[in-house]
Structures are given as structure tokens and as C-alpha cells.
Image (cartoon, rainbow, N blue to C red):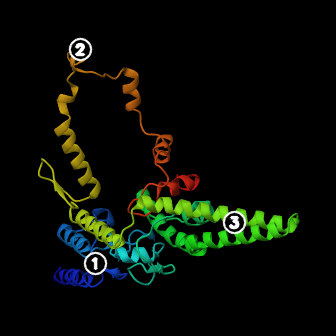
């Protein structure tokens, strides 16, 4: 126990120097995070489990996605005291997730050791140049849908919202590359305009020449496409209200929110009977049960005579309106809510606009 506490303090100290660099911590921690990571009879591990989780929070570490064997250690016993635990894992910070969004590790079957080998699978490091923002003109590219499909077909382990955010992060590099290939749109518009003026001059000096007429027509198409892309980009960026230093302010702001959220995490709770619950599912159920009793109970069963409210109410819902409000949400409702948002509205903290979700809805919907 004392050696583990020294390790926890060391990790918290090292984390102060890894705020701006990718950091991965891996190996045998000799501690579990949750009761679900133990199979078999074990002693009281609540203190060790709590200290391990507090260390992970204070160090700003996150679990790296894992595949393979869930339990990574076995006591190699065939007696009733057969015990399995998940003692080995890999943890990362947010900078690692930004640089290597597709990385994960695999837990293999134990062989010569009583611990499972852990194999890290990485991907190409991404050089990020400030906060990512999606430009809606990229949806007009023929490479847009294939690029989204390639990333979205990857299998990522985790809850649905976590999977979506990881895939969106992985798409950042794809769209940065597409944007680089487009070049400076304003400069391209000026070039296309110059080509068009040159073609018109040639046509006027060679009236009736079919070749020059075709050249002018092609230059008109190129200029129209370039101008359309530039117009889409300028309209969207005007809504974004870009300002000097905005990237840094946004990054610090959302980092502080993440730190504040992780600090408010509740690891255990004691119910009315004095029983302490540490399993995440039990903690959640205890909260729900408490507020159901607080806000519900017998009072929810009291019948209110609507006639007493009618003289003072200007608008009353009929039974049909009430029934429609109580219906569960459908995929069509979600799609309508997304498609009601204008495409050039300012994006959220992940940098993706509603225009992206509309154009990629057949894949990401």
C-alpha cells in the first residue's frame, strides 16, 4: 500500500510536466478501478481502489481504448480461491488523444506469465496547427463522402458518445489535408478571374473561333466554382467571429471545464441504510432513486381538477397535444432538429458545423 501511494504521488508530479505533450502510462498498477474488474474472492480493496481513481483524476489521465481479454492477471489457482483481476492497463492524457486519435491497445491471453501482454497499436502522428474548424465548402468536394466513410467504419470500443467524438477527432486530419489541397481560395478566385478576362480578350480578337469560345466557357465555369467556394467559406467564417487569440482562449476554457467536471466525479455514495456503494452503476441508481423519492412519491398521484385552473389559464393543451409531447423521440425527430440549424452557424467546441452533419448524415446519422 505504501509503495503504491508513492507511485500515485510520482504520477501526479510527472503530470504537471506533461500538460502540453502526449503522455502514455502503462503496465501493472497492482490495483483495480472498479469492482467489476475482479472475478473471485478478494479482500477489502475499497481504499486502494479509491486512491487509484483519485490519482488518475489528479493526473488528468484517460483510459486508452482496449480490445481483447478483460482480466489481465490470474492467480493460477485451481482451488475455490481462483481469482482474476484487471491490474494491467494503458492510460493517456488529452494531448495523446489529439495526436494519436486512432491508437488503442490489445490485451492478449496469458502464457508464460500470470499477466497478460499488452500490445499498443498507434497511428500517424498529427501535427495540429491550432483549434480545428470545419469549412463547409469541403462538403462540395468529391472526396468528402469517401473520407468520412473510411474513418466511420473503424471499430472503436466505448459508449456511443465516446465513439462519435473519437471518430470526429480522427476526421480532423482528413479535412486538414483536403483543405491544404484546395490552397488559398481567395488567391484561386483571382487567378480564375484573370484567366476569364484573358479568354474574353482572345474571343473578342478572334470572333467566331470555336476554340476560343470553348476556352472562354471553361474559364467561366472555373471562375464560378472558385467564387462559390470562396463565398461559402467567407459567409461561414463571418458567423464564427474569428478573433485574435481565439484558439488559445477556447482551448484554455474547455480544458478548465474538463478539469472541473472530472474533479466533481463521485466515486462512492452511502444510502439511507448506511450501505456504501462504489460500483458506478450502483452510484447512479442510488442518485436516481433518491430524487425519484424526493420529487415523486405520493404527491405525483394526487389528481388535480383542471376546472380550477381553466379560468386563469389562457392556453390549455388538449389530450392530442399532450399525447404528442409525451411520445418518445424518434430518429426522424433528431434529424429534423439537426437539419433545422442553418449550415453556416458557428460550430461547437469540436469545430464541426451543422453543415457537416447534414452533408454526411447518410453515414453519421
Q: Which residue is painted at 49% across and 42% down in the image?
A: 336
Q: Which residue is mark 1?
A: 30
Q: Which residue is mark 3?
A: 222
Coordinates of residue 237 in the picture (x, y in percent): 46, 63
- Position of residue 3 relative to residue 234, above or below, is below
3D distance between C-alphas at marks 1 and 3: 64 Å
Image position of 27 (left or right of 189) = left
Is tag 3's residue or tag 2's residue first in the polypeptide sequence? Answer: 3
Say whether disc 1 or disc 3 marks the residue closer to the N-terminus: 1
Residue 258 visible somewhere in the drawing: yes
Query: Is label 2 in a helix, a strand or a loop?
Result: helix
Q: Mark 3, residues whose alpha carbon is within 10 Å: few (<14), some, or many (≥20)?
A: some
The secondary element bearing badge 3 is classed as helix
Q: Tags 3 and 2 in contact by the CB under 8 Å rule?
A: no
For marks 1 and 2 on the same chain, the one whose residue lies earlier in the sequence: 1
Residue, disc 2: 307
Amino acid at each position: 500500500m505504501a509503495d503504491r501511494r508513492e507511485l500515485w504521488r510520482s504520477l501526479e508530479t510527472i503530470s504537471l510536466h506533461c500538460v502540453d505533450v502526449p503522455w502514455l502510462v502503462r503496465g501493472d498498477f497492482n490495483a483495480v478501478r472498479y469492482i467489476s474488474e475482479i472475478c473471485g474472492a478478494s479482500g477489502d480493496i475499497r481504499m486502494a481502489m479509491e486512491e487509484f481513481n483519485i490519482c488518475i483524476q489528479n493526473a488528468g489521465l484517460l483510459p486508452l481504448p482496449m480490445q481483447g481479454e478483460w482480466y489481465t492477471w490470474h492467480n493460477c489457482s485451481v482451488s475455490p480461491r481462483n481469482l482474476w483481476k484487471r491490474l494491467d492497463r494503458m492510460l493517456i492524457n488529452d494531448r495523446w488523444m489529439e495526436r494519436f486519435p486512432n491508437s488503442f491497445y490489445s490485451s492478449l491471453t496469458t502464457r508464460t506469465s500470470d499477466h497478460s501482454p499488452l500490445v499498443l497499436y498507434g497511428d500517424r502522428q498529427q501535427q495540429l496547427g491550432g483549434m480545428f474548424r470545419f469549412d463547409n465548402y469541403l462538403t462540395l468536394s468529391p472526396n468528402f463522402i469517401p473520407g468520412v466513410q473510411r474513418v466511420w467504419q473503424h471499430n472503436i470500443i466505448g459508449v456511443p458518445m465516446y465513439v462519435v467524438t473519437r471518430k470526429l477527432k480522427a476526421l480532423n486530419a482528413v479535412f486538414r489535408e483536403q483543405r491544404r489541397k484546395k490552397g488559398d481560395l481567395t488567391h484561386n478566385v483571382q487567378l480564375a478571374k484573370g484567366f476569364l478576362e484573358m479568354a474574353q480578350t482572345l474571343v473578342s480578337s478572334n470572333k467566331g473561333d470555336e476554340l476560343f469560345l470553348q476556352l472562354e466557357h471553361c474559364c467561366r465555369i472555373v471562375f464560378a466554382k472558385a467564387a462559390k467556394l470562396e463565398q461559402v467559406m467567407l459567409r461561414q467564417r463571418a458567423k464564427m467571429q474569428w478573433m485574435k487569440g481565439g484558439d488559445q482562449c477556447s482551448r484554455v476554457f474547455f480544458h478548465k471545464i474538463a478539469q472541473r467536471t472530472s474533479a466533481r466525479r463521485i466515486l462512492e455514495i452511502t444510502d439511507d441504510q448506511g450501505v456504501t456503494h462504489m460500483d458506478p452503476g450502483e452510484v447512479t441508481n442510488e442518485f436516481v432513486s433518491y430524487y425519484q423519492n424526493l420529487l415523486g412519491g405520493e404527491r405525483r398521484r394526487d389528481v388535480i381538477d383542471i376546472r380550477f385552473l381553466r379560468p386563469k389559464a389562457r392556453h390549455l393543451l388538449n389530450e392530442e397535444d399532450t399525447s404528442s409531447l409525451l411520445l418518445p423521440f424518434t430518429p426522424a425527430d433528431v434529424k429534423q432538429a439537426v437539419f433545422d440549424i442553418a449550415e453556416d452557424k458557428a460550430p461547437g467546441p469540436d469545430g464541426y458545423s451543422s453543415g457537416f452533419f447534414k452533408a454526411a448524415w447518410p453515414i453519421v446519422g
